[in-house]
Image (tube, rainbow, N blue to C red):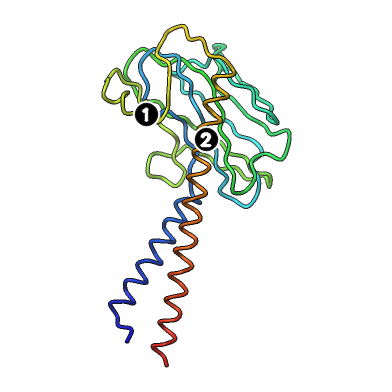
Amino acid sequence: MFNKSKLSVLLISVVASIMVFAGVASAHITVKPATSTPGAWETYTIKIPVEKDIATTKVSLKIPTEIVFKQYQPVPDWQISTEKDSAGKISTITWTATGEGILAGEFEMFNFVAQNPTEDTSVAWDAYQYYKDGTIVEWTGEEGSDSPHAITLITSSEEANSSSSTEHDHSTTTAPAISDQDLTSTETESTSSSSTLDIITLIISIVALTLSLVTLFKALRNKKQ
């Protein structure tokens, strides 16, 4: 006999599966690392997931006023341009696809080097994601909003930077020597790891949701009989 307790458990499983699936599908644009040290020449990585069924063809990132942009890494099939403010400081970097762009179900990562401010602070990265149909998603909201901007904490705290270094390697020297080979290697390893994890999570979510729904429908049908 199928009782209300079992029905509740199944409903909870269905909801949990939907939430996990939605979490995979609603990833935000991020800029890593989330923590860095004052004065460091940091290798930052912006990750752009596609949340629609159409391709992303352009991404613009506003450079925080406290940050000094230095270099970008060339990316195949993408044209990279920068804009300067009235003082001659690079204020925006834009990646424009020369091919198909970032397709539905994919993500892309771009690397660049910038120098952090010398004082402890928090900087916000405003990003603009352009889709092939002409729509634009502005990742400029506060934390907790539907389209939040990424935040990097610039701090001299050794504990905070030690935790951050486990998710993203960075240089703290004032005169770094960064080669294209090093950047490409880091990007390839990170992309492979993230892509595998995303795929596994998505498959598990879909399987769990399907099994939960099938069991729920069978239980409801048996209860009617």
Query: Helix, strand, or loop for circle 1?
Result: loop
Type of residue at label 2?
Lys
Q: Residue furthest bottom?
A: 225
The answer to which of 77 and 120 lies nearer the viewer is 77
Element under disc 2:
strand
Q: Is residue 33 left or right of residue 1?
A: right
**What residue sits right under mark 1 in the picture?**
166
Identified at 32% across, 23% down, the residue is 161
Which numbered mark, 1 or 2, is in the foreground of this view?
A: 1
**Number of residues whose C-alpha sits closer than 10 Å to that of mark 1, classed few (under 14), some (14–19) or many (20 or more):** few
| Nearer to me, 25 or 119 | 25
CA gap, disc 1 and disc 2: 17 Å
Viewer-nearest residue: 102 or 184? 184
Name the residue that disc number 2 marks.
Answer: 47
- Above or below for 177 versus 158: above
The residue lying at 56 percent from left, 48 percent from top is 51
Q: Amino acid at mark 1?
A: Thr
Q: Position of residue 104 (x, y in %)?
A: 62, 48
